[in-house]
Amino acid sequence: MARTRLIAALILTYVAFAMLLNSVGTVILQSISSFGVTKPEASTLEGFKDITIAVVSFLTASYLPRLGLRNALIGALLLAIAGCIVMPLIGSFGAAQFHFAMVGAAFAVAKVVVYSMIGLVTDSPRKHASLTSLIEGMFMVGVLSSYWVFSAFIDPTGLRWLNAYWVLGAITALALALLLTARVDEYRAHEGEEAAADEGPPFVAMLKLAALPLVLVFVACAFLFVLIEQGIQSWLPTFNNEVLHLPAQMSVQAASLFAACLAIGRFGAGAVMARFDWYPVLNVCLAALAALIVLVLPLADGLAPGAIHSWGDAPVAAFLFPLIGIALAPVYPTIISVMLSAMPNRQHPPLMGLVVVFSALGGTTGSIITGAIFAHLDGQTAFTLMLVPTAFLAAGLFLLRRRIALAS
């Protein structure tokens, strides 16, 4: 019962942060219209979120076991709740930047804690991969829910959309309440600390870990994946609005299809990975991703602004392009599970700290590059160029498999 309650707390925590973090695409779209900022200015929201995630994770991840994983997660949820209150009370672009910095700092801690706790409540690589896929799948359910929560509050003439943050704050508070009633046995997180003491202070140990060739290849793969995912996810509402000419509310709702496909892909990944080796599966996924980009984006050519009042009026590209989420979804949780299963529990927090750092940098890089191309060329070109990091990611997975084989 205690284990089930803790898993439920971890899942709801991830759902809450999914809704908060991935509202950035909607806030970019609404900031352009509500606060009168430019696309490059709006793209800085991703930076306020991800740079904060990277800095906080880099500075704190190695020390979280000493603070206590549960205590750290409680503090992260409290900070996220405060971030939810800031947005509707102040209601400005500066408040949005501050909000994403607060949420980013909270998530930097929460992600390390959640993944470290997965190792505490599972006892085999297969169960670890299954629970990882479940939690990441629920993360995408949170992303999907975020789009629909915001679309319910969007008003073309005002700031009513900011009230969505009261809903997100309530969900985060529920996750906190659930965690406060759950008990956590953190003994396994401290196993091997005597050996770790020989490696120096925790921060130094994390830097030594980052220097390992296997870890370098792994974090490079995480960086490239998030660059692709966030580059698409952050700008998809704007793509739907300006390239496919959907109304703002429908643009946000259509973007939720991408999140739905990511959720489907991650839930399905658990079953697939239980039967097949991870490397060929992920290569098939990347091939499917590239094929969908090449085949679907040309359907957005030459679309003229028109009266779109219902889904029946929407262009076919609005329904087909989000399918790349199914192909993209299994990559991230699979490579993380493969790495964590190969490492001792005491190294999970610093390793996840590195993952969070490079994932955050990848998210910011993807959003800023996509936004710049979107502004100076067009959205179709910006998304087509995602083929470049996809090719690099395929090469990274090849190197990762070789390094894991050599280490085992």
Image (cartoon, helix red, strand yellow):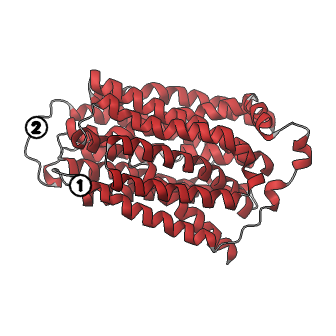
**Numbered mark located on residue 154 in the image:** 1
Q: Quadrant of the N terminus?
A: bottom right
The span from disc 1 to disc 2 (Cα, nearest Å) is 21 Å
Q: Residues within 10 Å of mark 1 (few under 14, many from 20)?
A: many
Q: Quadrant of the C terminus?
A: top right
Q: Nearer the viewer, residue 281 or 352?
A: 352
Q: Position of residue 52 (x, y in %)?
A: 54, 39
**Numbered mark located on residue 315 in the image:** none
* Mark found first going from the N terminus, 1 or 2: 1
Q: Answer yes or no: is residue 283 visible.
A: no
Q: Position of residue 42 (x, y in %)?
A: 33, 35
Q: Is residue 245 left or right of residue 198?
A: left
Please state the total of marks drawn on the protein image.
Answer: 2
Q: Nearer the viewer, residue 346 or 84?
A: 84
For residue 59, what is the image quadrant? top right
Name the residue at 44% across, 43% down: 98
Q: Position of residue 64 (x, y in %)?
A: 72, 50
Q: What's under tag 2, amino acid-wise? A: Pro
Helix, strand or loop under label 1: loop
Q: Residues within 10 Å of mark 2 (few under 14, many from 20)?
A: few
Q: Is residue 390 left or right of residue 383?
A: right
Name the residue at 74% across, 28% down: 213
Pointer 2 residue: 305
Name the residue at 55% across, 59% down: 77
Placement of 202 over or under 78, stated as above or below: above
Helix, strand or loop under label 2: loop
Q: What's under tag 1, amino acid-wise? A: Ile
Name the residue at 63% across, 58% down: 73
Q: Position of residue 307 (x, y in %)?
A: 7, 46
